[in-house]
Amino acid sequence: MENVPHNGTELEASIRVRVIGLGGGGSNVLAGIDRDRYPHVEYLAVNTDSQALAHSPLTHKVLLGQNITRGLGAGGDFEIGRQVVEADRAELEALVAEVDLLILVTGLGGGTGTAAALLLAELATQTEATVLAFTTQPFTFEGARRREISDAALADLREKVHGLIPVPNDLLLQETEEDDTALSAFAVADKWIGKGIHSLCAMLFETGIINQDFSALRNLLQRRGGKTIFAIGAGKDEDFVKDALSQLCDCPLLHATERPSRMDRILLHLVVGSEMGLAKIQEVVTSISEQFDSSKEIIVGAVMDSRFAKSLEICLIAKVEIEPTATTSDNAGLRNGREPMETIGSLGLENANMEANPKPVVHVSKLIGKKKKEANEDQDEFLFVDLEAQRGYFEQTDQNLYNNEDLDVPTFLRRGIKIKLK
């Protein structure tokens, strides 16, 4: 595998960043990203579909499983994907070597992307790399089996990486029009993930008013597991500050996981226009601190974009550690407090048969003891979308399926009902 040439600066040469698009979904995201903006970042596409790789604009490509799929792809079958990645383990090991920041981009629930993400994350635990993963989850209409594989993979992946940013496709339906196709939602996911990757690169490689280095990001994400809170927002022209803050709070990446009532440590990176001085930056940071109820520590970095006079881009990252409970375990195959199921190979995913276990006693409601929300507080329906939160009171029971729909998931997520946030 060739190395992407650096432009020679000591800063760029000192931080090795590799972004890997896995399967069809992950490769498509990287195909649409502006890869010239940070040429010292290495982008790769990994797939079992030789035709898809041939049409990919990425320079660096890895074809997996030629002896198993003959370049025809895994067909969305996780078992085939598992066989492929195990057969090409040595080649995947090379992808996680000699890198400081590894960013995995994939869709979960299928074959190649799901299996490759899990194995790459596992292999990376043997290195010094900080690992982030952007993942998309299937639409509800794609069926219960694909959803179950995605949920199991998401829980497994969360324990192996330093930061996980899930992007549920159902949630992104909120940004499309009623008569738009599923491709529109995929495009929205690609857009937000691309923005997230660019924001991280700006944080690492651009020097400006308040410098922020890789050690700040690594220290924030030093432990694997837990939940990562990630959001981006941007604004231009007259109301650029107001628009950027509004977009930050409405960012789908922020609402893709359950946000805690308080975040004590936040990493904040700003890209500001030439008219924005330090006093205005302080106002923005104070506003974000109040919005996210965080006063303990906010690590701030800021660079100036001389192309615009009135502009602001915000990237927010926070890590929330999850205390061990009856619903989490270090043993692979334990999920939602159930007994271990048969695992597949070394990946820690449950057997594809996913046979139901006897229903446990429903846990004590998480609502007990929480303060009542003010009547004028913003709605929080979007918080019920990740594995640990979307089923609420029913999270330790078997799925209540009807026509391939989980009836315990809120209706607006199952049916793609649009709820406009102000």
Image: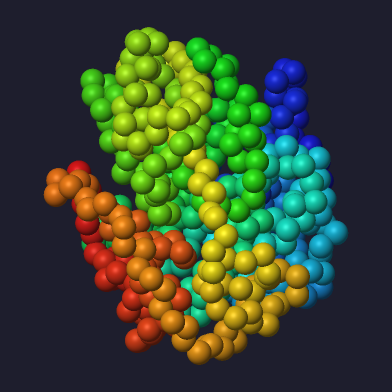
Q: Quadrant of residue 295?
A: top left
Please determine whether, in this image, residue 409 is positioned above or below residue 92. below
So how many labels did they put on this image? 0
Q: Residue furthest right?
A: 90
For the point 22% across and 53% down, the residue is 372
For the point 50% across and 12% down, the residue is 209
Please determine whether, in this image, residue 279 is positioned above or below residue 187. above
Query: How far across and how far down the image is residue 375, in percent?
Result: 14, 49
The front one of 330 and 171 is 330
On the question of residue 372 being in view, the answer is: yes
Query: How far across and how far down the image is residue 122, in percent?
Result: 73, 58
160 with respect to 171 (left or right) = right
Q: Quadrant of residue 72?
A: bottom right
On the question of residue 234 being in view, the answer is: no
Q: Residue furthest front?
A: 369
The front one of 227 and 316 is 227
264 with respect to 223 (left or right) = left
